[in-house]
Image (cartoon, helix red, strand yellow):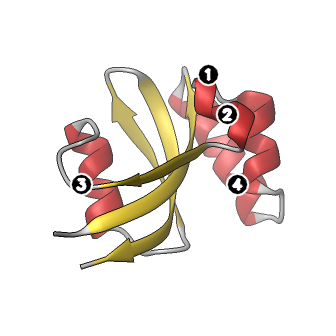
Amino acid sequence: MPRASARHILVASEEVCEKLKADIESGADFAAVAREHSLCPSGKQGGALGTFGPGQMVKEFDEAVFTGEVGKVLGPIKTRFGYHLVEVTNRTE
């Protein structure tokens, strides 16, 4: 069964999500941005979500994690919680 480790940043708007993505792609540290801006409690741990399998996260998030490129910042991904930036740090098939 596939497993993935990821970290994410949750914000309320697509505009904020796009700006934070640009900041990270310009060299800002993902974990530092997560600690400062994420609305999710995982932000305190730099956005780290640990390791999980398919179906354990909401559908849109799950699809990005199990199909997106490892090590690349993915998003904005809209879910019922808001807008996410996701970085898959590891994935096994």
Of the two numbered discs 3 and 4 in the rendering, the one whose residue sits closer to the viewer = 3
Whether label 3 touches label 4, CB < 8 Å: no
Q: Is residue 82 above or below residue 87?
A: above
What amino acid is found at the position of numbered circle 4 in the picture? Ala
Q: Is residue 63 above or below residue 58?
A: below
Q: Which residue is mark 1?
A: 39
Whether label 4 touches label 2, CB < 8 Å: no
Of the two numbered discs 4 and 1 in the rendering, the one whose residue sits closer to the viewer = 1
Residue beneath the point at 25% across and 55% down: 53
- Which of disc 2 and disc 4 is earlier in sequence? 4
- Using the numbered discs, state the Cα–Cα distance from disc 4 to disc 2 in whole angstroms: 18 Å
Q: Which residue is mark 3?
A: 63
Residue beneath the point at 32% across and 56% down: 64
Q: x%, y% of residue 51?
A: 42, 56
Q: Which residue is mark 4?
A: 22
- Using the numbered discs, state the Cα–Cα distance from disc 1 to disc 3 in whole angstroms: 21 Å
What amino acid is found at the position of numbered circle 2 in the picture? Gly
Residue beneath the point at 36% across and 34% down: 78
- Which of disc 1 and disc 4 is earlier in sequence? 4
- Using the numbered discs, state the Cα–Cα distance from disc 3 to disc 4 in whole angstroms: 22 Å
Residue 43: quarter of image: top right
- Which of disc 3 and disc 2 is earlier in sequence? 2
Whether label 1 touches label 3, CB < 8 Å: no
Would residue 78 appear left or right of 73 to someone viewing this image? Answer: left
Residue 35: quarter of image: top right
What amino acid is found at the position of numbered circle 1 in the picture? Leu
Q: Secondary structure at mark 3?
A: helix
- Using the numbered discs, state the Cα–Cα distance from disc 2 to disc 3 in whole angstroms: 21 Å
- Which of disc 3 and disc 1 is earlier in sequence? 1
Q: Which residue is mark 2?
A: 43
Whether label 2 touches label 1, CB < 8 Å: yes
What amino acid is found at the position of numbered circle 3 in the picture? Glu
